[in-house]
Amino acid sequence: MAIAEILSRTRTRIACFGGIPLGDEGRSFLERGLLVTPCTEDDLRDTAYLSGVAAVVFTQNIKKYLSIVPLFEEHAKRLLDHDCSIFVRLAPDGRSIIINTLNRLELPSAGLSLSEQDSFDAWMPKRSGNPPPPFLYVCDTAIDWAVIANLISETPFGKAPNFDLIVDSKDEDGKEIKFSSSNELLIRRAFWDCAEVHLVPMLDGLSDVLVYRAYAELAKGHYGKWPRPYFVKIGKRAGIFAEYKNYEDGVRPYIPFHLGPHLVHDRCCLGAEDGIIVGDFVEESESLRDCASDGRAAAAIACLFNSTLRGWYLHAQNVQSPLTAYLLPHFPEKIPENREARARELGATKTLSDLRVLFEKCTFSPVLVGPIHGDLHATNVLVRSADAIIIDFQKHCENPIVYDAACLEAGLLVDGFSDDKRDEVEWINSIMPLYRETPLHSASTRCHPSNQSSWYYACIHQIRLYARRMQHYDDKHGDQYAAALALALLKKASNKKQFVKLKESRRAGAYVIAELILTRISSGISRPPEL
């Protein structure tokens, strides 16, 4: 058998509201090491009481079906945030009331029929089985208490929130960061064995997920109180769980151990609406963006495609579906008006709708499809010595593998020139020869060493060397990398966030280059000449 450490349960209480098992029914809980006690609403408001509670069982009043609704409205989400799963025993005719309440409150729910799952709004994945705990489990009163005892004993739960933990976090201006009550509970659960945790915001990402570097002080460290630093991500429950699964299923088995961060499993947890993942922080590294603009990225890019991502790309398969079948769903719907206007000043003539029509014509097939990162921008690749370490697996998926290379090039274009103060026309003219190549992935264009964009040429040549292997290219299959790159550039250009003037001009430039690429593909210029 696998090595496992036997841990004692620190939370053994099962709180019952509205009914309690007696006699033989109660013994089924004792046999599983669970202590059943009645509880009141005041108990459910008491954080000290909840620290010892593994689960709460509500029994719907047979004479007052609706009386359970305000209980759920007040207590359900907070209980789940404390990692207390909820089991509700339904009255004979009270099921529809409970189901409607769960849907309205958007509570992660188990024990539902397929038709009930289908009746829920879009927030709940359809026919996906039971969600990960903590959750609310629906069962009829006809079910024996012993069955409920077994369900509870088989439902894993973590440590209770540590209310003695000192949580310190300040923004870049030194102002204290205030967490929501649910997010604070997640932090206190994640660092249950610590006396203090200091959270430093990491500002490179543009997603809605909160990302921090965490310095913890253990309450009882084996060798001392300071473990290695962690990274912490807090976000919506579904997204956090999806990223957790990506780490477990897609990263751990395939990415070399020294080229990807590792999760600390007993610090990762979920609440009613949000979740938190904690992993080892990659120390003594810098982003590929910073490394590249200093002219030191060639070895890291080679490592990225030869070693870091090799375990994924080995599994790529030829698929006869067209490129657009995979990438068209990622096409942006809107570009900020001010950025579109700036793109027109730089030479763009087509609307986003016009460019979509051109992209729809990129029906190149077959394509190499396999696991990809999905968001391989220049700050999601960290460089330590010559190693390329990838982070942030929220968008890991299966898609044409050429899209990873395209995202990396697009990311370097919009982020790599963040310290370049040249006029935007001078800047875009300095890199435009790279986008007039035929075919685009030939990587043959050179520039004078004195050109301030020479570092970018070196990076793009390296990326496109690998892009050649990721696509089919001939007069029939077309320039798949060019199409993927155009999409990646348009996604950068269409980001709804407003940036400082310099970064706005880079994203407007991305739009101009994407238009040039799609126009050339449409006109057939990107295809090789006939012999």
Image (cartoon, helix red, strand yellow):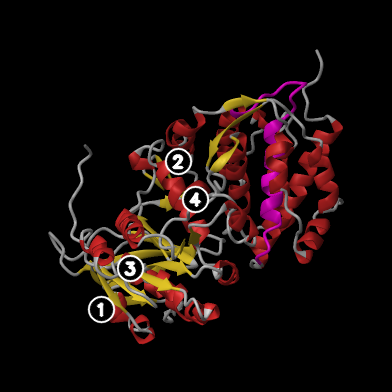
Task: State left or right for residue 390 relative to residue 160.
Answer: right
Mark nearer the N terminus (1 vs 4): 1
Residue 164 - label: 1
Query: What is the CA distance from the residue labelled 2 to the residue labelled 3?
Result: 26 Å
**CB under 8 Å between discs 4 and 2:** no
Callout 3: few (<14), some (14-19), or many (20+) C-alpha neighbours within 10 Å?
many
Front one among 97 and 412: 97
Question: What residue is pinned by disc 4?
Answer: 380
Quick check: 253 above or below 330?
above
Question: What residue is pinned by disc 3?
Answer: 189
Query: What is the CA distance from the residue labelled 4 to the residue labelled 2?
Result: 16 Å
Query: What is the CA distance from the residue labelled 1 to the residue labelled 2?
Result: 36 Å
Image depth: mark 4 or mark 2 in front: 2
If the image is split into quadrants, where does the C terminus sit? Answer: top right
Quick check: 346 above or below 488?
below
Q: Is residue 348 visible?
A: no
Query: What is the CA distance from the residue labelled 1 to the residue labelled 4?
Result: 34 Å
Mark nearer the N terminus (3 vs 4): 3
Question: What residue is pinned by disc 2?
Answer: 250
If the image is split into quadrants, where does the N terminus sit? Answer: top left
**CB under 8 Å between discs 1 and 3:** no
Task: State left or right for residue 268 relative to residue 414.
Answer: left
Callout 4: few (<14), some (14-19), or many (20+) C-alpha neighbours within 10 Å?
many
Residue 329 lies in magenta, yes or no?
no
Query: What is the CA distance from the residue labelled 1 to the residue labelled 3?
Result: 11 Å
Image depth: mark 1 or mark 4 in front: 1
Mark nearer the N terminus (1 vs 3): 1
Mark nearer the N terminus (4 vs 2): 2
* Secondary element at image label 1: loop
Label 2 is placed on what type of residue?
Gly
Task: Measuring from the top left, give residue 529's x and y in whole percent.
Answer: 80, 20
Check the image and name the residue furthest to the top. Answer: 531
